């Protein structure tokens, strides 16, 4: 099995995306819990206990998080750095990508006009 990303909705693996980095879960329990919680693979209750998904464990050998989920594209070992924990996910990108599609749809309205006007102008010239 190639290294593959375990984030729900992310389907990268070492064979398809060799340019990405694949990070295994941190050995430090407190940090690992944050990763598990961040990738929505398990819920952490108020007492800090992880309710593991029955079908999933971060201890599996093929469980990695790819570099796409880090703001700067790489994991930071300094625990207080925002990139110590993966934070970019398909579900967090939904809002920003809908903003982009709104901008694109505005451009789509403008650009056909420009394209239609161009032949007229060049015809007059
Ligand atoms: Zn991924």
Image (spheres, rainbow, N blue to C red):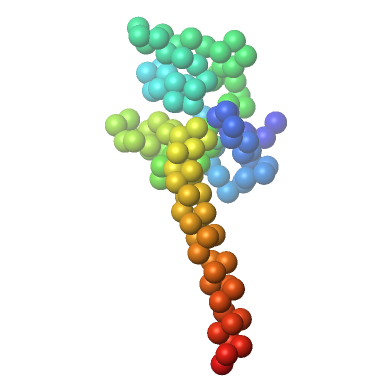
Task: Give the image location of residue 28, x and y in percent.
Answer: 40, 21
Examine the rendered structure and indicate whether residue 111 appears above or below residue 82.
below
Examine the rendered structure and indicate whether residue 103 appears above or below residue 49.
below
Task: Give the image location of residue 11, x and y in percent.
Answer: 63, 36
Q: Looking at the image, can residue 27 be seen?
A: no
Residue at far bottom of view: 125
109 horizontally vs 79: left or right: right
Q: Nearer the viewer, residue 76 or 107?
A: 107
Q: Nearer the viewer, residue 117 or 31?
A: 117
Residue beneath the point at 67% across and 35% down: 2
How many dots with numbers?
Answer: 0
Q: Nearer the viewer, residue 54 or 104?
A: 104
Q: Looking at the image, can residue 100 be seen?
A: yes
Task: Give the image location of residue 39, x and y in percent.
Answer: 49, 26
Q: Quadrant of residue 7?
A: top right
Task: Give the image location of residue 119, x and y in percent.
Answer: 61, 81
91 horizontally vs 76: left or right: right
Residue at far right of view: 1
123 horizontally vs 23: left or right: right
Quadrant containing the N terminus is top right
Residue beneath the point at 59% across and 73% down: 116
Examine the rendered structure and indicate whether residue 111 appears above or below residue 58.
below
Residue beneath the point at 48% across and 9% down: 51
Quadrant containing the C terminus is bottom right
């Amino acid at each position: 099995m190639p290294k593959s990303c375990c984030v729900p909705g992310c389907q990268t693996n070492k064979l398809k995306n060799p340019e990405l980095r694949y990070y295994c879960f941190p050995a430090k329990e407190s940090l690992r819990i944050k990763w598990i919680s961040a990738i929505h693979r398990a819920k952490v209750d108020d007492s800090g206990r992880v309710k593991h998904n029955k079908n999933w464990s971060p201890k599996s050998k093929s469980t990695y998080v790819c570099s796409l989920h880090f703001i700067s594209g790489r994991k930071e070992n300094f625990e207080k750095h925002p990139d110590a924990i993966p934070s970019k996910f398909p579900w967090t990108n939904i809002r920003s990508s809908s903003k982009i599609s709104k901008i694109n749809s505005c451009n789509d309205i403008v650009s056909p006009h420009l394209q239609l006007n161009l032949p007229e102008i060049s015809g007059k010239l």
